[in-house]
Image: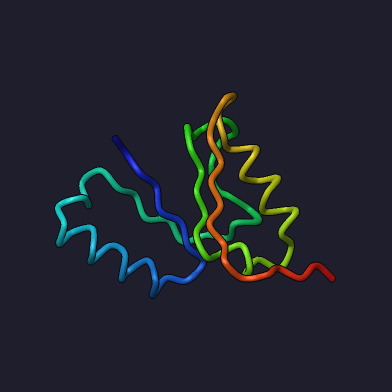
Amino acid sequence: AHATVLDINGSMLSVGRDRAEKQGLAANTDFVEANAEELPFESETFDAYTIAFGIRNVPRIEVALAEAYRVLKRGGRFLCLEFSEVEMP
C-alpha cells in the first residue's frame, strides 16, 4: 500500500516524516505541503481520503470537501474524524 500525507504546515509534515521513518513506513509514503482547498493532484487519484482533526482548521470547508471529492476515484472512500463542533459563518 502507498500513502500520501498532506499538511499545510511544513513543521507537522516533518514530525510525520520522522515518525514514518522510525516505523519503517517512509518508503511507501509521500509527504506533500499544500492547502486542502487546492490539492495538487489529478482528479480521481486516490482510493481513499481521510482527514483527522483538520476540517475545523480549513477556512472554506465546502471548498476542501469539493477537492476531496475531486481527487477520489469513483467509489472511493471519504473518512472524516472530527470531535469539535464546526461553526459555519
State the image coordinates of residue 40 (x, y, percent, origin top left). 55, 48
Residue at 56% across, 36% down: 42
Between residue 42 and residue 82, name the one nearer to us.
82
State the image coordinates of residue 75 (x, y, percent, origin top left). 57, 25
Answer with left or right where residue 48 lies relative to residue 60.
Answer: left
Residue at 16% across, 57% down: 23
> Residue lying farthest top?
74
State the image coordinates of residue 69 (x, y, percent, origin top left). 65, 39
Residue at 70% across, 45% down: 66
> Residue lying farthest right?
89
> Residue lying farthest bottom?
11
**Image quadrant containing the C terminus:** bottom right
- In which quarter of the view is residue 2 placed? top left
Q: How many marks?
A: 0
Residue at 42% across, 70% down: 10
State the image coordinates of residue 8 (x, y, percent, origin top left). 51, 66
